[in-house]
């Protein structure tokens, strides 16, 4: 039986655990920070002296930690790109925008254990010589922002923040910054623009790599809430110990947000790659399977931006054996280990860790219409392919779900979706809005053709029917 | 035209501005503070914000028009935000929306926020609220309600009406 491995959610799961400082301290909170701040410099074999922050950065590198915000980029590498010679201040921003549909993991941390995030964040700031940092939290998390505000005040009163933290000589301020309901603020350069008080239009890379030209054109680190919590656990247990969790190149634990047609939707913490999609959905300790009499139809494995898997789909599973050889085999998509690399090799991604399960009661045309409506609403509008394409796709899908479609819509959707991704847009939203359309239409083509044909037949047979009117108002 | 916010609010806003090396960065937080107090961002409040932060009014207006959470008109005393996105749609959020619109005498097919004529309720569809495991979800002002059945939604509306009659927060 698949098991959870609780590291980040360990305390949050205890029923009498509260989000205040006192409770956090009773559970050993801020001990890792104290140790890190007292860590002496060490002399390496080659005579180089490594400061405490450098040692911390090295532990993160050794841990193999990959970002949990969506892209899965190596955290150690990201930190190594930071321009430390510019003479400008270095900023760190915690990305708590959590808006990829299907994702609700950062909320668990923010609501249940905000000090865990703060301790991880302070460690990350210390490791990178940051003295001013922000938590960018989505505007709708009103309660979360208040909890964070209180946690920050508590941490400051207890000397874990502010000037001369715990008499170490290290100064750090962290502030909460609230967004206001725009998904694109989750994209790191859009987030930075938003934090500068502008419209959150993502910046073009190059030259605007945050590590060099980020907030106020200064070197900036943007990390997800969960990533920063992992930093705390790596600092506590050591990078090599952390790397023993999970699988090679996909280390540690990860929060999976499971929703849709499962018996036990929820946020589960698993060792990366030690649990398959099948385990996540069907294991009684995890998703608990589908409801009685239902059949699996599709799985969206990494937020609505990821490419959908069809039930029964055979995918390529790439594995590295202990001696470094690559093996390839064809497996059912449910047998994919839930990690970064396997899902990418299988043609999708684990993204933000959001798994949405669709059973045979789901109308996949309506599901895609719902997803496309989201992207049409959230495109920031800077790039023509994304702004126009996301709207056209949503419009075509709207007419398919409201009785005005035709069989050719399937090909039109594909045609539009194919022209958005691949470096034609400023940010990855372009990919994000086209991947679901490309994959749904390719894998469930018959559903789209049939819907178009049914629409046409009904129109031919005497105009809008009662059912069509209902479908038009229901949207799904 | 001019608007001077009360002293306590201005003090709160000054504290917000001091969090940033550049005042412009505070603009979202300032707008949130103003909206919390006045219910929406009036043209006066917009111009005041611009003056306060050393910006042109257009710099603030382009934000108020971009970010969905800011409102330029007064809204209902109780703002119901229903999640429209996939997880909640699968769990019946459209039925929930139609049901609530019916109860409040509003049009379920209308686009964008709608407010009841008595100014009591505004109802609106919003995107994923990051609580999909508890679908369908709905916010009533700042509070998130999970697994909202039709019955529960009606009860929430009734509680709001009761609270309004007796002058307390639900
Ligand atoms: C359209 C779009 C939306 C995104 N939304 C989020 C988000 O809500 N939260 C998040 O942490 N990262 C989000 N990201 C990823 C961020 O750009 C960035 O990669 C991440 O915050 C880096 O943190 P990490 O390295 O710790 O994962 C988004 C990316 C894109 C392209
Ligand atoms: S790809 Fe879309 S969301 Fe990203 S910058 Fe271009 S228009 Fe904006
Ligand atoms: S889909 Fe409604 S909360 Fe995520």
Image (spheres, rainbow, N blue to C red):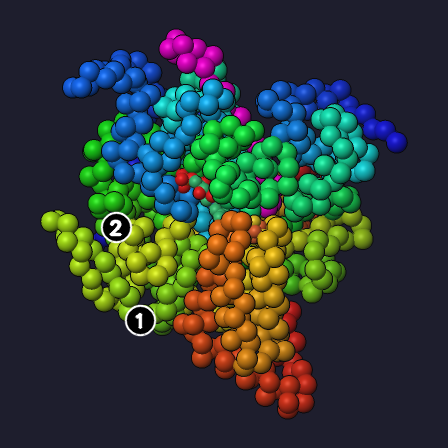
Is residue A95 or residue A108 the one in the foreground?
A95
**Image quadrant for the C terminus of chain B?**
top right
The yes-or-no answer for disc 2 within 8 Å of ligand 1 is no
- 1 and 2 marks in contact (CB < 8 Å): no
Which percent across, then down, holds residue A199?
Answer: 64, 41
The subunit carrying tag 2 is A
| B44 to A427, vertically: above or below | above
Q: CA distance from mark 1 to mark 2?
A: 20 Å
Which residue occupies 26% across, 64% down?
A316
Q: Is residue A250 magenta?
A: no
* Residue designated by label 1: A312
* Residue designated by label 2: A273
The magenta stretch is A163-182
| B66 to A393, vertically: above or below | above
Identify the residue at the far right of this view.
B1
Q: Is residue A164 magenta?
A: yes
> Which quadrant holds residue A401?
bottom right
> Which quadrant holds residue B149?
bottom right
The earlier-in-sequence mark between 1 and 2 is 2
The subunit carrying tag 1 is A
| A229 to A87, vertically: above or below | below
Is residue A438 or residue A372 the one in the foreground?
A438
Which percent across, then down, holds residue B142?
Answer: 61, 40
Which percent across, then down, holds residue B67?
Answer: 65, 44
Which residue occupies 55% across, 36% down?
A192
The yes-or-no answer for disc 1 within 8 Å of ligand 3 is no
Q: Secondary structure at mark 1?
A: loop
Which percent across, then down, holds residue A268?
Answer: 34, 47
Which residue occupies 17% across, 59% down?
A327
Q: Is residue B13 left or right of residue A233?
A: right
Mark 1 neighbour class, 10 Å CA radius: few under 14, some 14 to 19, many 20 or more: few
């Amino acid at each position: 039986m698949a098991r959870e491995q609780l590291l980040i959610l360990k305390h949050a799961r205890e029923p009498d655990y509260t989000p205040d400082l006192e409770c956090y301290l009773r559970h050993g909170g801020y001990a890792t920070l104290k140790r890190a701040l007292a860590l002496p410099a060490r002399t390496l074999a080659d005579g180089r002296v490594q400061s405490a922050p450098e040692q911390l950065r090295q532990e993160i590198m050794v841990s193999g930690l990959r970002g949990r915000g969506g892209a899965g980029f190596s955290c150690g590498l990201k930190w190594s790109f930071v321009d430390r010679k510019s003479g400008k201040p270095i900023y760190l921003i915690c990305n708590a925008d959590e808006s990829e549909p299907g994702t609700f993991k950062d909320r668990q941390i923010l609501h249940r254990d905000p000090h865990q995030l703060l301790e991880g964040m302070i460690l990350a700031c210390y490791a990178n010589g940051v003295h001013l940092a922000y938590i960018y939290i989505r505007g709708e998390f009103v309660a979360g922002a208040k909890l964070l505000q209180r946690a920050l005040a508590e941490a400051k009163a207890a000397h874990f923040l502010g000037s001369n933290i715990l008499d170490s000589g290290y100064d750090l301020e962290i502030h909460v910054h609230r967004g206001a309901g725009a998904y694109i603020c989750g994209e790191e350069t859009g987030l930075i623009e938003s934090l500068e008080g502008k419209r959150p239009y993502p910046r073009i890379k190059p030259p605007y790599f945050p590590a060099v030209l980020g907030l106020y054109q200064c070197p900036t680190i943007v990390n997800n809430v969960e990533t920063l919590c992992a930093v705390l656990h790596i600092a506590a247990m050591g990078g090599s110990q952390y790397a023993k969790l999970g699988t090679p190149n996909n280390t540690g634990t990860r929060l999976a947000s499971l929703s849709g047609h499962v018996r036990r939707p929820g946020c589960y913490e698993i060792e990366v790659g030690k649990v398959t999609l099948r385990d996540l959905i069907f294991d009684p300790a995890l998703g608990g399977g589908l409801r009685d009499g239902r059949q699996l139809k599709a799985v969206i494995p990494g937020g609505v931006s990821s490419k959908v898997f069809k039930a029964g789909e055979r995918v390529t599973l790439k594995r590295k054996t202990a001696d470094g050889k690559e093996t390839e085999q064809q497996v059912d998509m449910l047998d994919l280990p839930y990690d970064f690399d396997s899902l990418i090799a299988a043609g999708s991604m684990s993204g933000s860790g959001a798994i949405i399960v669709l059973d045979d009661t789901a109308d996949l045309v309506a599901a895609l219409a719902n997803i496309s409506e989201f992207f049409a609403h959230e495109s920031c509008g800077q790039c023509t392919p994304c702004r126009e394409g996301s709207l056209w796709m949503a419009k075509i899908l709207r007419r398919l779900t409201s009785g005005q479609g035709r069989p050719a819509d399937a090909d039109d959707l594909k045609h539009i979706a194919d022209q958005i991704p691949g470096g034609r847009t400023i940010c990855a939203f372009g990919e994000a809005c086209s991947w679901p359309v490309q994959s749904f239409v390719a894998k469930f083509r018959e559903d789209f053709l049939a819907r178009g044909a049914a629409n046409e037949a009904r129109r031919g047979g005497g105009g809008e029917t009662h059912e069509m009117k209902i479908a038009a108002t229901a949207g799904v | 035209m001019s608007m001077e916010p009360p002293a306590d609010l201005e003090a709160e806003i000054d504290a917000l501005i001091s969090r940033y090396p550049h005042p412009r960065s505070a603009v979202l937080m300032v707008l949130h503070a103003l909206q919390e107090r006045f219910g929406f961002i009036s043209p006066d409040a917009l111009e005041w914000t611009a003056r306060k932060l050393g910006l042109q009014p257009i710099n603030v207006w382009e934000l108020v028009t971009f970010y969905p959470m800011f409102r330029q008109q007064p809204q209902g005393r109780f703002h119901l935000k229903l999640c429209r996105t996939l997880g909640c749609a699968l769990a019946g959020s459209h039925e929930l929306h139609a049901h609530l619109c019916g109860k409040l005498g509003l049009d379920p097919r209308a686009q964008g926020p709608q407010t009841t004529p008595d100014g009591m309720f505004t109802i609106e569809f919003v995107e994923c609220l990051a609580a999909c495991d508890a679908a369908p979800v709905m916010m009533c002002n700042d509070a998130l309600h999970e697994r909202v059945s039709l019955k529960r939604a009606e009860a929430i509306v009734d509680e709001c009406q009761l609270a309004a009659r007796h002058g307390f927060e639900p």
